[in-house]
């Protein structure tokens, strides 16, 4: 999930280990499917190590054999201040991944469950300024966004919806906020006019070239530090040119399962 920079310091995160069955993860967008569980686990361990180096207290849940995509824990919950929405996930094969996530976060936050028919993946939700940017995608429907709007409004957040093209999995697949007031997004997926209301408010919009679309998904921290995927030189140069301290990690084996940086963690403080 994204971040409300005024209230969330990215100090605690939940992650989940790679499933023993990871080679059967869903892959229709960036990847053709992971082929090496051992190398995927090494990449995941590097990811967790990087979060901890950035000062994050990381809690690790075990992987689940019957859920190949379970490491993409971002999709299993949406944290809004002291509440956690545990959604009906957008792909039926992933139903059940929420159980342990709900149990862990339920000891810390108020759990809210949407009605049947309201589908949503956490990867379609990004906090930005005083609002939630929410993607309407193949995984998130109008009923899901309407329910989240009701929860968010009680906490003072508005919602801005984005139609996600069929070529793109989630909003966060091609969009992130690496620092307050800045959105990084990829050419060829979302349209400039979709961001016009934010640009008109004075927010900064940075575009990643289409051939590096995967690199638009980043994790930003305080003091202009940002974690990006390795081997995307144009995106790295773009971010360094506007003042970021960049840490790049290898995501090749995670990308093979259509996973990105934010997919692998769920920040709850």
Image: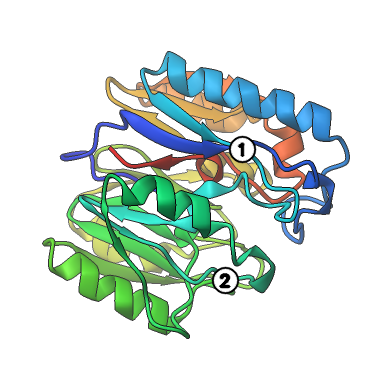
Q: Where is residue 40 in the image (x, y as percent from the top left)?
A: 75, 32
> In the image, is 172 to the left or to the right of 202?
right
C-alpha span from label 1 to label 2: 22 Å
* Residue marked by disc 1: 62
**Front residue of 27 and 186:** 27
- 201 over 9 or under it: above or below: below
| Residue 90 disc label | 2
> In the image, is 31 to the left or to the right of 258?
right
- 262 over 163 or under it: above or below: above
- What colouring style does the render use? rainbow
Mark 2 surroundings within 10 Å by alpha-carbon count, few (fewer than 14), some (14 through 19), many (20 or more)? many
Q: Can residue 81 be spotted in the picture?
A: yes
- Rendered residue at 40%/35% (across/down): 13
Mark 1 surroundings within 10 Å by alpha-carbon count, few (fewer than 14), some (14 through 19), many (20 or more)? few
Q: In the displayed image of the protein, which residue is found farthest to the right? A: 35
Q: Where is residue 172 in the image (x, y as percent from the top left)?
A: 49, 53
């Amino acid at each position: 999930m994204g971040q409300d920079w005024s209230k969330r310091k990215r100090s605690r995160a939940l992650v989940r280990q790679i499933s023993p069955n990871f080679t059967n993860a869903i892959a229709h967008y960036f990847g053709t499917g992971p082929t090496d569980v051992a190398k995927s686990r090494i990449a995941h361990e590097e990811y967790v190590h990087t979060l901890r180096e950035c000062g994050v207290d990381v809690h690790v849940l075990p992987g689940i054999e019957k859920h190949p995509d379970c490491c993409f824990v971002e999709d299993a919950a949406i944290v809004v201040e002291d509440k956690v929405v545990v959604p009906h996930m957008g792909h039926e094969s992933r139903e059940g991944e929420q159980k342990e996530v709900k149990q862990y976060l339920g000891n810390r936050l108020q759990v809210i469950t949407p009605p049947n028919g309201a589908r949503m993946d956490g990867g379609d939700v990004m906090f930005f300024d005083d609002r939630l940017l929410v993607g309407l995608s193949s995984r998130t429907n109008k009923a899901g966004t309407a329910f989240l709007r009701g929860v968010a409004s009680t906490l003072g957040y508005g919602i801005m919806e984005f139609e996600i093209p069929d070529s793109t999995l989630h909003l966060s697949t091609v969009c992130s906020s690496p620092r307050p007031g800045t959105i990084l997004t990829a050419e060829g997926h979302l349209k400039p006019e979709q961001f016009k209301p934010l640009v008109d408010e004075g927010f900064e919009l940075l575009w990643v070239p289409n051939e590096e679309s995967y690199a638009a998904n980043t994790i930003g921290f305080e003091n202009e530090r940002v974690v990006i995927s390795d081997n995307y030189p144009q995106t790295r140069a773009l971010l360094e040119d506007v003042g970021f301290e960049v840490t790049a990690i290898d995501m090749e084996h995670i990308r093979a399962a259509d996973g990105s940086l934010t997919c692998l963690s769920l920040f709850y403080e």
